[in-house]
Image (tube, grey):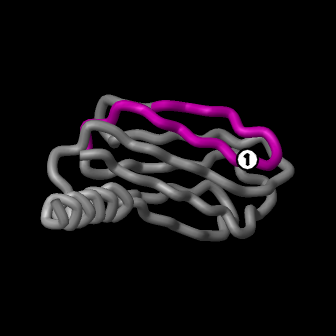
Amino acid sequence: MIRIIIVSIFFLTFISCKMTNDRQKLKTNIQSDTTLILKKTANQGNVWGIDLKIIGDFNDTITLIHTNGDNVAYSHKLIGGIDTTYHTDWYSDSCLIRFENIKEPIKDLQIDYEFFD
């Protein structure tokens, strides 16, 4: 019985570490229209989804576009401060994030992201 408990704890620990291991964080300041490239971690397999959380304060109405550079692009209008999560199907190893219509610098913009495999 003790062996089963120990193996179960080991298995759960291994699974939970794998689930949180792929989340990445990017902090940046943006002065003008900018494109950022987000990439999956080296140990990930085929990507089927992406989770983007964007946190920042600004005064403008800006456009956020996330695209794979080929045939998929999602566009969002952001007004003022944001604390938003985008969760969508995604089938590319990278994601280009484009911020457009930047009139005033955005300080301490944070992007938390995870590619799902």
Does residue 42 appear in this view?
A: no
Residue 37 coordinates in the image, percent (x, y): 41, 58
Residue 16 coordinates in the image, percent (x, y): 33, 58
Residue 84 falls left or right of residue 92: right
Q: Is residue 4 magenta?
A: no
Q: Is residue 90 magenta?
A: yes
Q: Which one is in front, 27 or 18? A: 18
Residue 110 appears in which quarter of the rendering? bottom right
Residue 46 falls left or right of residue 22: left
Kindly identify which residue carries mark 1. 82
Question: Residue flagged by tag 1: what amino acid is it?
Answer: Ile
Boundaries of the magenta span: 74-92
Q: Residue at x 72, y 52 (%)?
A: 102
Bin the neighbour count of mark 1 within 10 Å (Cα to Cα): few under 14, some 14-19, many 20 and up. Answer: some
Residue 32 falls left or right of residue 48: right
Residue 42, compared with residue 71, is above or below; it is below
Q: Residue at x 70, y 69 (%)?
A: 108
Residue 29 appears in which quarter of the rendering? bottom right
Q: Which one is in front, 28 or 14? A: 14
Q: Residue furthest right?
A: 59
Does residue 112 appear in this view?
A: yes
Residue 66 falls left or right of residue 7: right
Residue 12 coordinates in the image, percent (x, y): 27, 58
Residue 97 coordinates in the image, percent (x, y): 49, 49
Q: Which one is in front, 85 or 10? A: 10
